[in-house]
Image (tube, grey):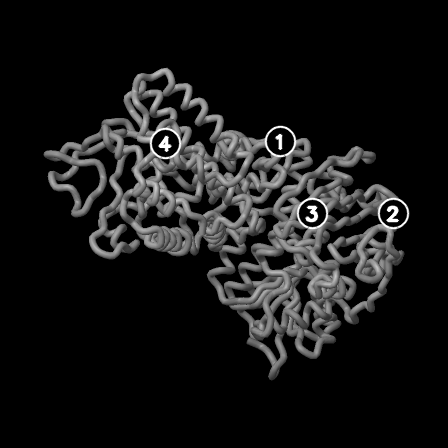
Amino acid sequence: MTSHQGVISFAIIGTGLIGPRHARTVVESPDAELVAVVDPAPAGAQLAAELNVAHYTSVSDLLRSEHVPQAAIVCTPNHTHVAVSKQLSSGGVHVLVEKPISSDIPSGTELLSHLQTTEVKTLVGHHRRFNPYIISTKKVLESGVLGKIIAINGLWTTYKPGDYFEAPTEWRQGKDGGVVLINAIHEIDLLHHLLGPITRVHAEKTTSQRGHEAEEGAALTIRFKSGVVGTFLISDNVPSPYNFEAGTGENPLIPKTGQNFYQIFGSDGSLSVPDLSIWSYKGTNKSWHSEMAREKLAVEDGVPFELQLAHFCRVIQGKESPSCSPQAGLGALIVCQAIKDALEANSLFLRSPFASCPFTPAPVILHWAQSVTLAPATDPAIIALLRPPTLSLHSACFAPLHEKAILSQLSSAKPEQTYYKAPFPSPSDFTIMSSAAPHGSNSASSTNGVVDIKNLGHVETPKVEGTWTVEKALEISPGTAGPADAGSPLPYFHLIERLKTTKREGWRRFGIARGESIADHMYRMSLLSMLAPPALAPRLDLARCMKMCLIHDMAESLVGDITPVDGVAKPEKNRREAETMDYITKNLLGSVYGGIPGAEIREIWQEYEDSQTLNSHYVHDLDKMELLLQMMEYEKRGQGKLDLGEFAYVATKFTLPETKEWADALLKEREHFWGTQQHVHGEDGIEGGVQEDRRQQQDDYYERK
């Protein structure tokens, strides 16, 4: 590839509004050399001649030429960004692609999937990250001088004249020409850059004055993964000095006002941007009665486009990581699409599926749901944990006062986003097996070549000889998951079917052979989680709690349901489950959608295991509550002849007073039930008395880490 010693060669792809600016920035850079301009329009040839570089009319011609660059800057129309970036990266050319990374989320995820198959470096051109005011702001936030960041208030408000929406740009009157995708996307990227991922957004439309389909503004409330909350007002139809362009003076076509557009509030002080004033109380006494001090900070030097190019050169050289990676670039688009969906859905709460990483670099197949057939036994509630971002944007957030079951999105999704399930097989679809079942098979028994159809819904837990390992469990459970297929979630889908076919062992000890499965238990827990008491709900992340309910026993798909009386020490149980979760989330899901869903599943499972957060305490209590409910229901159906009193002991292990009230009420209900029976209950009465050794087993099992 063309280059001089220590200098990176560049080509400019597209010479519309921004291309010439990038070209001149490259020419003036000591780190870069411009070798070619690509554009079929006459403007491309004119720019190439002006700058004395080669001109090509297509990327294909460039890649076949003697001027193949080390890197290229993609400045073509938005809808071509993905195709051009794929073509360049396939040719080994590093790519700086102007924002947005794509014109829609499916094509953006397609590009991310492609980039993972190459070794090129990619940067998304959100150049505002390199604005001196933003650089100074980020340094203040990282210094900790403001203390813990609590909230942010932001404004992007201005007035666009009527000719902005007229030919040749009358497309701006349509739904894609509104203030969200054209302007707010810059603000969302800066919020991600400064404060981290956004996990939830709520939007209300402003009053429309133009009568166009495009939205004119919105009021947003935002929550970040870090816990920071924010409000943001956007409008392109109000005379106002409060916006990034006017505040910083970055755009020479917009007069500078210097007015603040961000106010960031911390536990020790507040910061306004762009005047970079830090307000804090004098002395150590923080009180609204105390006098406040104002410190004005200096603004960093530099030109954003020059700083961005220098950064990209260092990224190519392996000296720095991309400031705005393709994942981050797509993240801004995903949040903006969520805002638009919220506006169209009459201000529903919308939430990313992966609160820990809302802009999942998911290499989903376009129209994924149409191209994947799910096995009949697959549990959709757990599949929902892996739903692609294209579906997640239409899912309702589980707000404390307005829950919607996780499966509701399966019936409300748009046609092209619906999960399709294979038809349920009829009995005639079951063919005769060979007279000898596969070695080590744990599936329904086969006698004389006939499948025991009535027991196909139950699979025994693998009985491993010697030290338990995942490999041994899989070896004696053929067909459980199938080989890991890079990028495909199907092996995972098949493995979690075992959660439906594996029974909860505690009930089987009392002769309940066809009792609840692990999936039954987790599913009802997820439904219980939505009914958090009002005194508790505002302090919980209910969406995360629901996920935790569906994840917490996932390891039992291979480990099985180990009970306090099974003779397996708690550390050994923990080891087996941790190794199984590593296998599921890394071996099976490590390459699925960029590995992000697997990583989040593992993180949430570990949070439950560590039991250090309020969310995990709540789910632990739900785990016990579901057990108590099932105990009571089996006893009632046993008509007084089935005493499950030993399980009532878990009522003493609740940690939250709000959920303990549920347990106490259930025990009173149970006391009333047994009061009508002639059966003598338990060893020590209605509270579920058990032998001392059994109680010690239960104490060890339910001990917090």
Label 4 and label 1: CA atoms lie apart by: 35 Å
Which amino acid type is marked by label 4?
Gly
> Dot 2 lies on which element?
loop
354 relative position to 149: left or right = left
Image disc number at residue 688: 4
Q: Can the viewer see residue 489 in this picture? A: yes
Label 3 and label 4: CA atoms lie apart by: 46 Å
Residue in front for this viewpoint, 285 or 78: 285
Image marks 2 and 1: residues in contact by CB distance under 8 Å: no
> Dot 4 lies on which element?
loop
Residue in front for this viewpoint, 545 or 566: 566
Instruction: Give the position of the N terminus as an image quadrant.
Output: bottom right
Image disc number at residue 458: none
Whole-percent x, y for residue 208 in the image: 80, 34
Q: Can the viewer see residue 55 in this picture? A: no
Q: Crowding at label 4, few (<14), some or many (≥20) Cα neighbours within 10 Å?
A: some
First in sequence: mark 4 or mark 1? 1
Q: Crowding at label 1, few (<14), some or many (≥20) Cα neighbours within 10 Å?
A: few
First in sequence: mark 3 or mark 2? 3
Q: Crowding at label 2, few (<14), some or many (≥20) Cα neighbours within 10 Å?
A: some
Provide the residue designation for mark 3.
229
Residue in front for this viewpoint, 123 or 410: 410
Which amino acid type is marked by label 2?
Ser
Q: Nearer the viewer, mark 2 or mark 1?
A: 1
First in sequence: mark 3 or mark 4? 3
First in sequence: mark 1 or mark 3? 3
Image disc number at residue 401: 1
Label 4 and label 2: CA atoms lie apart by: 69 Å
Residue at 82%, 58% (x, y): give it: 280
Q: Nearer the viewer, mark 4 or mark 2?
A: 4
Residue at 50%, 39% (x, y): give it: 546
Provide the residue designation for mark 2.
240
